[in-house]
Amino acid sequence: MTTPERLHALSAEQLHTFREQGYFGPFQVYEPDEMTRLWKRERLALMDRSMAVYGDEAASSGNTNISNYDRHLDSPFLADHVCRPQIVDRVTSVLGLDTLCWRTEFFPKYPGDEGTDWHQADTFANASGTPQIVWPEELKEFGGTITVWTAFTEATVENGCLQFIPGTHERMNYDETRRMHYRPDGINHTVKDGVRRGFFGYDYRDLQKDPDFVPDESRAESMVMRPGQAIMFWSTLMHASHPHQGGDLPMRLGFASRYVPTSVRVYPGTEAIEEYGGRVTLDRYGAVLVSGEDRYGHNTLTDRTTRGHVFPRG
C-alpha cells in the first residue's frame, strides 16, 4: 500500500511540542470569510434532522448536548470537514495512518452562558457511567481521544473561548468510574472559585480522586481563535472554557471532531447512550474511517458517502 503524501503533517518539532503540551494550534482549516459564509449556509441545512442518526429521539429529549452528536453522519459539509487533510494529516501524525472519527459534537455558548468547568476525559464514561472508548491492553498507557475543536465563529475570552493547562494530559485527576449526578436546574446558576462554571448539568468535581484538588489556573492559557481556525488536543488535557459575558457579544460556536486509532473499541457492548438527561440508540451509528485501513473489525463503520448506511462489527 502506498503511503499518501500528508501536506499538513506535524513536523518533528511540532510533534514534540504536542507531546509536551498536550495540544497543538491554532491552525488554519478555512479562511475566516470562507468559514463565515459556509456556516451561514450550513446552519440552515442542519435544522433538517430527517436524516440525523439520532433524529426524533434526540430532539424529543429536549437536551441540546446529546442531540448535537454526530451530525457529520447526515451533513455532507460536516462529513467532508472531519476528513479534511488540514485536520487528518495532523491527527494521523500522532495516532498513525489507521484512524477513525468516532464522534462529533457542537459546542455553542450563548450570551450569558456559564463557562465549562475544568475536566479531563479518558474513556468518556464521565456522564454515561459506561466506557465509550477502550484502548487495547497492550497500549493501556495511552488513553483518551484526540479532539480537534474548530471555531465556526469568533472565539474570544469575552464570549467563552477554550482554556488549557499545558502538560496536564498524562495524569488523570478524575475517576470516571464514579458517577456524576445530573442537575439541570443548576445550569447557568453555579459559581466555582468566583467564576460562573458548570458542566452541562453536572458537577465535575464529583469525579475528583483528591477531594481537595484545585486546578492551577495560574498556568491556564486561553485559546483565542478566528472563524476557521482549529486546535487539536488530548481529551485527557485539563481543559475548560470562559463564561460568555453577554451583552451584544456574538454567540461562540465550536465543532469538535474526535479521533482514535482503529485498534480502539468504540462503544463496546453498548446499544444506547444515556447522558445529559437524554437517551439515543446506536442502531444507525457508525464510526468513519478517515485514514488508512481497519485491520481489526471490531467497530461499526459507516460509509460517509451513503448518509448513514452502517457496516456492523466484523
Image (tube, rainbow, N blue to C red):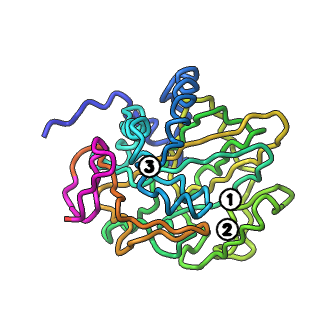
Residue found at the far left of this picture:
1
Quarter containing the C terminus:
bottom left
**Residue 50 badge:** 3
Query: Label 3 vs label 2: CA separation?
Result: 34 Å
Residue 259 percent across, percent down from the top left = 40, 51
**Residue 118 badge:** 1
Q: Which region shows up in magenta?
A: 294-313
Residue 93 percent across, percent down from the top left = 36, 42
Would residue 285 be found to the left or right of residue 199 on screen?
A: left
Secondary structure mostly seen in magenta is loop
Q: From where the camera sits, is residue 146 visible?
A: no
**Front label number (3 vs 1):** 3
- N-terminal-most mark, 3 or 1: 3
Q: Nearest the camera: 314 or 178? A: 314
Q: Amino acid at mark 1?
A: Trp
Residue at image location 61% in from the left, 69% down from the top: 277
Tag 2 and tag 1, C-beta contact below 8 Å: yes
- Characterize the local packing of mark 3: few (<14), some (14-19) or many (20 or more) Cα atoms within 10 angstroms: few
- Characterize the local packing of mark 2: few (<14), some (14-19) or many (20 or more) Cα atoms within 10 angstroms: many
Q: Amino acid at mark 3?
A: Ser
